[in-house]
Image: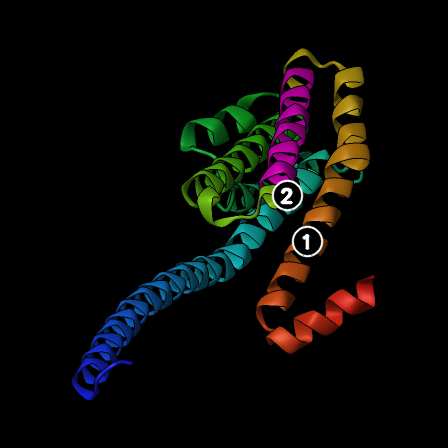
Amino acid sequence: MISVSGKKWIENKFAEKLELFRHTQAIELQKLRDEIDSLLSGTIKLQEKEFETLPEVWDRLNAVYEKISSLLSPFKSYPDLERMPEDAMKEFMESTPFTQIQRKEIIQSGRMNGRYQEYHTLYMIHEVKLSYSELEKLVARNGIFLQPKLRDLMESMSEAIWSSITSKEIGNDAQDSKLQRESLNNLRDTVKPLYKDIETYIHTRLQSHGQTPNDKSLTNQDSQ
């Protein structure tokens, strides 16, 4: 039979072990909480950065799409410089984005309308390339914050846009109507569908950022 003092000693040892166990568990639990908080904080920051980046990506992509659509449009209209009064023609030329040397060359070319159209096409190609470059830099700089699906879509879009630009530029330099038609066909068959896919994807991602966890759960249930 255990004595009173022996029983007391056992109880004290048990209490010490229990307290040590509780202390160890509390430390482990706090470490786990800290890890979860860190993961959540990182996830929230990534989502916030994505939410900031998506509208900018869309704005840059939209600018490229509008410019390349205008460049490749078969329904462009140009001013008839050769029928303008000289004063009106010179005033109009001063409003163009061309250099003084280019303006002078157009006026003195003997075929103002044709030369103007050639320079205007070159200028539009330059503008598309500039917008395209800005989009590429933005995606490269912020690609880590974009979802893999969007990065894949943007990569496909980049290749399609560049293909259209190149075909148009080479076709324009060589006066090759076939290449220029290929550029337009690529815009219609590849660039435009990708543009619509990216629009839908970005719209969906932005909506998801504005949903509460319950909203997202309901959305997931509806989609099943």
| Residue that appears at 48% across and 27% down | 102
Instruction: Look at the image and tell me in which quarter the C terminus lies.
Output: bottom right
Residue at image mark 2: 149
Q: Quadrant of residue 188?
A: top right
For image coordinates 65% across by 46% down, the residue present is: 66
Q: Position of residue 68 (x, y in %)?
A: 65, 38
Residue at the top extreme of this rendering: 174
Crowd around label 1: few <14 · some 14–19 · many ≥20 (10 Å): some
Residue beneath the point at 68% across and 48% down: 198
For disc 2, the neighbor class at 10 Å (few under 14, some 14 to 19, many from 20) is few
Distance between the Cα atoms at labels 1 and 2? Answer: 9 Å
Residue extending farthest bottom: 4
Question: Overall secondary structure of the magenta stretch?
Answer: helix
Taking the spot 63% from the left edge, 28% from the top edge, the residue there is 159
Amino acid bearing label 1: Tyr
Residue 113 spot, x, y in % from top left? 67, 30
Per the image, label 1 sits on a secondary structure element best described as helix
Q: Which residue is mark 1?
A: 201
Residue 76 visible? The answer is no
Three-letter amino acid code of the residue under disc 2: Lys
127, above or below 58, in the image:
above
